[in-house]
Image: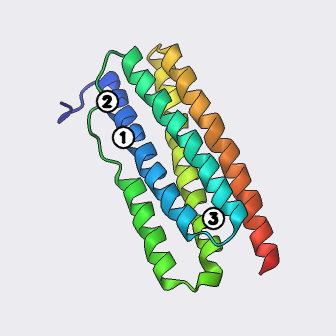
Amino acid sequence: MFENLTTPTELFRFRLGTALEMEHDSLRMLGELENAAMSDDLKQQFSHHADETRQQIENLTQAFLLLNLEPGDKSSPTTKGMEKQAESLLKKSDASLHDDVVISAALGTEHYEIATYRSLITSAEALGIAEVAELLRANLGQEEHTSQELEEAAKRHAMMA
C-alpha cells in the first residue's frame, strides 16, 4: 500500500502502523523479560506493563478505526533489534545480572516508544486529527510513567550491587 510515501498523511499512517507493530513487539518482549527477571517486583512490574501495552494496542487500533484504515502489517525493526540485543545480553550474563539486563532493555524500549509517540502526536496535531492525538497522548502518558518506574527500579538494583 505505501511503497512510495508522498504526503504527510501517508507518512503518518505508515508510522502509525509501525507504532502498532512496535507495541506488539514490546508485548512479546515483556513476556520474555518477565520470565528472565529474578526479582518478584520486576516480574510484577513487567506483568503490569504488559496489561498497559494491551491497552495501548487497543488505542492504536481505535486510531485506525477513526481514520477508516486497516492497520496493515508494518515492520518495526528497531524494537525487533532491541529484543535481540536483550536476548543476547541475557545469554551472556550471569543470572545475578539478569535483573539489570531486563531493566536496561525495558528502559531502552520505553525511551524509543516515548520518542515515537511524541513524534506521532506532533504529526496528528499538524494534520488536525485531534481524536487520534488524544489516543496517542494516553499511550505516551503510560510510557512516561513506566519509564519513571523503571528508572527507580534501576536505582534500587544499583544500590544492591
Image vertical order of residue 158 relative to residue 115, above or below: below
**Cα–Cα span, label 1 and label 3:** 24 Å
The residue wearing badge 3 is 103
Residue found at x 60% / y 47%: 49
Q: Quadrant of the N terminus?
A: top left
Of marks 2 and 1, the one in the foreground: 2
Residue found at x 53% / y 54%: 109
Q: Where does residue 51 sit, x and y in percent of width and height? A: 57, 42
Which dot marks residue 92? Answer: none
Mark sitting earlier along the chain (1/3): 1
Mark sitting earlier along the chain (2/1): 1
Image vertical order of residue 158 relative to residue 121, above or below: below
Residue closer to the observer: 142 or 13:
142
Residue closer to the observer: 116 or 62:
62
Q: Where does residue 146 sit, x and y in percent of width and height? A: 66, 48
Left or right of 103, for residue 69? left
Image vertical order of residue 45 relative to residue 58, above or below: below
Q: Secondary structure at mark 3?
A: helix
The residue wearing badge 2 is 71
Residue found at x 41% / y 45%: 24
Residue closer to the observer: 122 or 65:
65
